[in-house]
Amino acid sequence: MKAKYIFKGLVAALLLVFITGSCDSYNEAVIEDLNVSREFSPIGLTARIRNQTTVELNWTLKEEDAAHYVIEFSADDPEFKTIFKTVEVTADQLPVQVALEGETVYSIRVKSVSSTGLADSKWSVTTATTLSEQIFLPVQDADIDATQITLRWTPNSTVTQITVAPGDIIHTITPEEKTTGVAIITGLTGETTYTATLLNGVKKRGVVTFKTGIDIGTGILVKPEDDLNAVIAAAPAGSVLVLMPGDYTKYTGEILLDKPITIRGLRIADKPKLHVKFTLSATATSLSLIDLELNGDKTLSEVVKYNQSGTYGKLLISGCIVHDYTGSLVYAPSTSSARIESVTVENSICTNMVTGSSGEFIDFRASYVGNINVTKSTFNNVAASRGFIRADATATFGAGLTSSLIDSCTFYGVTNTIANNAYVIFYVRFATNAAIVRNSLFVETAARYTSQATTIAPTFSNNNYYNAATLNAAVSTAAVKSDPAGTALNPQFANAANGDFTVGNQNIKDNGIGDPRWIK
């Protein structure tokens, strides 16, 4: 029995010694410095392509940064057997942008270099694929003619030839053209869309698409001193009137159209200035307005009005500058039951269209329109106190589909109101409807997309909303549909007050949001 207690006593004594020793170990100094023989590798390394062929690199910085970082690029070579480019940067240069060549998969590695004599860190690795290089400069309207074009690119670039399609045209670049970055391509056909490719050997260095100007041919040439109304009245149905640059003041006001006709400017860069509005009768089945400046002088109402019931073909407004009208861009009143194939507004700028009490910007009260297409255009202070597109219900022409497309447009102060249930982007009550909104930029508006239960929610993709919260609401409320997936970045316009909507925000530029003319 005594031996049992002696054994327990020994165990207790040993435990006491162990516990006392363990407690004493906690009194040792805390390790504040980690003895390492090399720098830590950069962490959180990211690579993003900017402007087609520039990669932007960034990584997480530690409190104690390295002296500098070494970045190595290998082209189409994941094992880094051949280093294409080496760059050294410091922490305060992050994020860093590095220009590369186009259409290439780059392996990228970054290491830290010590300022205290430690060995370099191990490499952190990522990859990035550049897009097609673009050293072509934007095509200027003044450089486009009917049968030739002047193309420009970054001077002194390494380039060998330009190919143009259709037509399989090959232009060999001369030493002088290489130095100046300018070449004239001839042998083109009027009113044709071409794609030009700038090459260095077989490597693509730029691509640009353009449409040649009008070759008058059988068109009717009109001069500024002519009476435009009289010329239109005398022209046969289906005529193409080609207007020389200038201010057309011999006739101003309403033009009554009773035939299909095309009215267009001769030169894209010098648009003829008209002070008219167009009212269509049932026999004016189609109308094209191309490369014109249309000025309402703050007195003229609707730009285009369908005044009679009937069946119409296509309405095209292309490459136009439209401003200072007091009514709609396109209007069909409730007294007109028209069936219209399509309405297309493209590559145009509409400014200060104060529709007031007259109606919505594109407004159909008792008519059916198959397609409303609004693309690559800018709308600045238009229908600020009214809706943008209106298509009321009508059973006159059966139950066809009316569809709307908004693509690559910039909206500033459009439909900036919630004063009435009808004042929305899509006031569409036609029984069968569909809408798409993509690649578009909405700024400074209280607008809602919809207000009617019968309006199908639009299909949205790649849009941005700045100070346009209702369009971008996280959750749609009843009939008020919204685009929660859209971003809400400040586009950083160059000078919105004076109509310069050039985008400064790099993310918006990278994503191609808005009217392309402002993405530079």
Image (cartoon, helix red, strand yellow):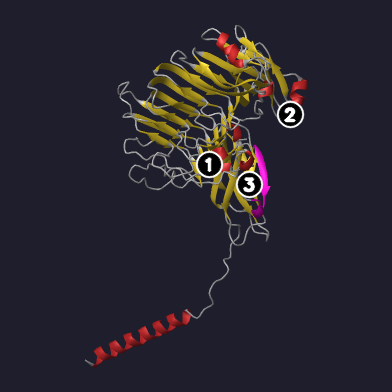
Dot in front, 3 or 2: 2
Task: Give the quarter of the image for residue 234.
Answer: top right
Image quadrant in which the C terminus is located:
top right
Q: Is residue 89 magenta?
A: yes
Specify few, some or many for label 1: CA neighbours under 10 Å numbering under 14, 14-19, or 20 or more: many
Specify few, some or many for label 2: CA neighbours under 10 Å numbering under 14, 14-19, or 20 or more: some
Q: Nearer the viewer, residue 168 or 452?
A: 452
Work out how far the residue at label 2 is from the one at label 1, CA to CA, in angstroms.
40 Å
Query: Which residue bears the numbered disc 1?
Result: 413
Kind of residue sitting beneath label 1: Gly
- Residue 308 got which mark? none
Q: Nearer the viewer, residue 291 or 176?
A: 291
Q: Is residue 201 above or below residue 37?
A: above
Work out how far the residue at label 3 is from the one at label 1, CA to CA, in angstroms.
36 Å
Kind of residue sitting beneath label 3: Val
Q: Is residue 519 magenta?
A: no
Dot in front, 3 or 1: 1
**At which x and y percent is residue 87?**
67, 44
Query: Which residue bears the numbered disc 3?
Result: 96
Mark 3 lies on a secondary structure that is: strand
Task: Give the quarter of the image for residue 102.
Answer: top right
Q: Work out whether mark 3 precedes mark 1 in sequence or the reverse, and give the earlier one.
A: 3
**At which x and y percent is residue 284?**
47, 14
Q: Nearer the viewer, residue 226 or 502?
A: 226
Query: Which residue bears the numbered disc 2?
Result: 155
Kind of residue sitting beneath label 2: Pro
Residue 396 visible: yes
Work out how far the residue at label 3 is from the one at label 2, CA to CA, in angstroms.
25 Å
Q: Which residues are magenta?
A: 84-93
